[in-house]
């Protein structure tokens, strides 16, 4: 459930999986639809970990991780392991005590020539998938990033993760390079 591509100096997903680097030109991103959401925050850590486990379980990116593993992974997002967490560009949909969907964005390689906002995690709990939540949250993040002057949003996705790739494709993400080559 790691966010970065192989070759990064931070967290690496299992090397047996091909990862694709995608990038969205924020100038071409569709405008976000209306959606009741709020900013994601470190206080959501436990709820985000539960969401992560529900969303990833049974997917190609799930390796029998436990709730503790998910908590650690979310902790990495907030502690800056993927670059500085951008709270104003990260959104969640909350439903009663739980989260339905989340889009967490960090700033990778801050201050360097290859600085880029990174979509660290997009996830929707199983029973709320295919309702447009992840797409809507990503477009909210794209609009927020654009408002702050950023021009692109990067991410890494496992090549076999077809649901995620379809979402990214529909939103206009384009391949940047293939990793694990
Ligand atoms: C990828 C993910 C975040 C999509 O969340 P979502 O809220 O269902 O996304 P949306 O409803 O905005 O999806 C829009 C499109 O994505 C595609 N899609 C979403 N879920 C899909 C699925 N289970 N199977 C096939 N296509 C899917 C479809 O094209 C869908 O449009 P459609 O329903 O009109 O066909 C969700 O499936 C998820 O949490 N997966 C596990 C975590 C993960 O892999 N995250 C991405 C890591 S890079």
Image: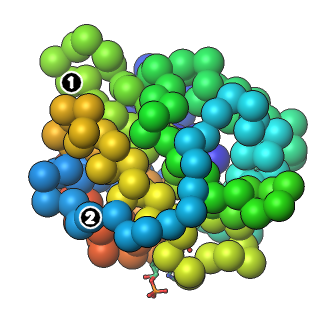
Most extreme residue toward the left is: 27
Q: Which residue is mark 2?
A: 31
Q: Judging from the image, what secondary structure is the residue with disc 1 in?
A: loop
Q: Which mark is residue 114?
A: 1
Residue 113 visible from this viewpoint: yes
Q: Is residue 129 above or below residue 29?
A: below
Nearer-N-terminus badge (1/2)? 2
Q: Quadrant of residue 70?
A: top right
Residue closest to the eye, 144 or 165 = 144
Q: Is residue 38 left or right of residue 82?
A: right
Q: Position of residue 181 (x, y in %)?
A: 30, 46
Q: Residue at x 58, y 48 (%)?
A: 38
Residue 69 visible from this viewpoint: no
Q: Residue at x 17, y 40 (%)?
A: 151
Q: Position of residue 68 (x, y in %)?
A: 86, 37
Q: Is residue 111 left or right of residue 122?
A: left
Q: Is residue 20 left or right of residue 53?
A: left
Q: Is residue 83 above or below residue 37?
A: above
Q: Judging from the image, what secondary structure is the residue with disc 2 in?
A: loop
Q: Position of residue 59 (x, y in %)?
A: 65, 67
Q: Residue at x 73, y 46 (%)?
A: 48
Q: Residue at x 86, y 44 (%)?
A: 67
Residue closest to the eye, 126 or 26 = 26
What separation in Å lies between label 1 and label 2 (alpha carbons)? 26 Å
């Amino acid at each position: 459930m790691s966010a970065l591509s192989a070759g990064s100096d931070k967290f690496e997903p299992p090397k047996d999986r091909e990862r694709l680097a995608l990038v969205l030109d924020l100038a071409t991103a569709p405008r976000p639809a209306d959606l009741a959401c709020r900013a994601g925050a470190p206080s959501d850590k436990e709820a985000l970990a539960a969401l992560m486990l529900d969303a990833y379980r049974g997917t190609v990116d799930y390796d029998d991780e436990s709730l503790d593993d998910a908590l650690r992974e979310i902790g990495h997002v907030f502690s800056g392991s993927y670059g500085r967490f951008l709270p104003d560009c990260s959104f969640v949909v909350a439903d009663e005590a739980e989260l339905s969907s989340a889009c967490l964005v960090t700033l990778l390689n801050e201050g360097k020539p290859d600085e880029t906002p990174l979509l660290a995690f997009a996830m929707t709990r199983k029973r709320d998938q295919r309702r447009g939540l992840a797409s809507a949250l990503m477009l909210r993040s794209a609009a927020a990033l654009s408002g702050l002057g950023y021009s692109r949003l990067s991410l890494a996705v496992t090549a076999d993760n077809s649901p995620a790739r379809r979402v990214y494709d529909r939103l206009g993400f384009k391949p940047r390079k293939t990793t694990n080559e």
